[in-house]
Image (cartoon, helix red, strand yellow):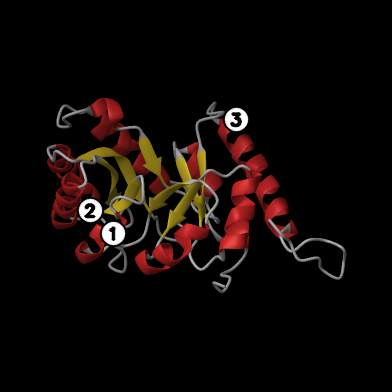
Amino acid sequence: MREKLLSNGQTGFEDIRENYARIRENIENAAAQVGRIGKVRLMAVTKTVSPDRINCAVGLGIDLLGENRVQEFLEKRESYSPAEIHFIGSLQTNKVKYIIDKVSMIHSVDSMRLAEEIDRRAAQHGLVMDILAEINIGGEESKGGIPPREARDFCARLGALGNVRLRGLMTIPPPGCGEERFAEMRGLFDEIGSGADLSDATCFDTLSMGMSGDYEAAIRHGATIIRIGSGLFGYRQPVR
C-alpha cells in the first residue's frame, strides 16, 4: 500500500494507526472490567471511507468491515484487502439480490418482509445467510427496528425460515442514553437466547451494539461486535 508523506514526516494513515491503538486499549480495558477478554470483535464501519484508508485498517489487523449503503459497497468492494464484510445499514427488499452472495451477515433485519426476501434470495444461491434482528431499544420513531416487547415473537418467526440463520440482536441506542439501554439489550438477548422459541438457540451468539461514542459501555454489557467508524477513520472522508 502506498502512503502519501505529509509535511511533518508522517504518513497519511498515521491517524488511523493512532486511533486503532487507542481503541484496542479501550476495548481490552472495558472487557477486563467484566471478565470478557478476547470476546469482543471490532468492526470498522466504512461508510464514505476511501478504499486506501479501509485497507490501512485491514493491514493493522481489523478483519471485519461494516457497510451501510448497497451502491457504495458495490463500487468499492473490488478495492478491498481481504476481510469479512457485514451489511449494517437499512436494507430495502429490492436491494437484497445485490448483496446476498457478497456479505456474510446482515445486521439490520427489522421486518418479516425483509427476512423473507433474504431467505428467498439465499435459497436461490444455495446459501444460509446469517442475520441479526434489529431492536429499537429506545423506541425512537426516526430509527428502524422491532420494539423490545415484540422481539421474542419476531425472533421465533425468523428462526423458522430455512435459508437464514438468526445469530442474535443488533441495536443503536439513543445518543447519551447512558448504560441503561445497553443493560436492557443484554437482558433481552439473554432472555431470547435461553428461550425455547428458537429452532436453534445454539447459534444465537451475537450482540451487535456500541459505536464510536459508547462502545466501552456496550462492551461492559455484553456486546460481541462493536461498530466503529469516526473513532477509527475520523469524520466522514470523501470516497475517491
User: Which numbered disc flags the more N-terminal residue, 1 or 2?
Assistant: 1
Name the residue type under label 2: Pro
User: Which numbered disc flags the more N-terminal residue, 2 or 3?
Assistant: 3
Q: Are marks 1 and 2 in contact (CB under 8 Å)?
A: yes
Q: Distance between the Cα atoms at labels 2 and 3?
A: 31 Å
Q: Is residue 25 above or below residue 47?
A: above
Residue 182, picture quadrant: top left
Q: Quadrant of the N terminus?
A: bottom right
Residue 36 visible at all: yes
Q: Distance between the Cα atoms at labels 3 and 1?
A: 31 Å
Name the residue type under label 1: Gly
150 left or right of 232 in image: left
Identify the residue position indicated by label 2 in the image.
Answer: 147
SS for dot 2: loop
In the image, residue 118 lies at what x, y percent?
A: 20, 51
Labels 3, 1: front one: 3
Q: Is residue 82 above or below residue 143?
A: above
Residue 84, picture quadrant: top left
Q: In the rendering, which numbered label is found on residue 32?
A: 3
Residue 32, picture quadrant: top right
Name the residue type under label 3: Ala
In the image, residue 122 lies at what x, y percent?
A: 21, 47
Identify the residue position indicated by label 1 in the image.
Answer: 139
Residue 231 visible at all: no
SS for dot 1: loop
221 left or right of 26 in image: left
Of residue 167 and residue 37, the one placed in the foreground of this image is 167
Q: Quadrant of the C terminus?
A: bottom right
Q: Residues within 10 Å of mark 2 (few under 14, many from 20)?
A: some
**Residue in the picture at 45% in, 59% down:** 77
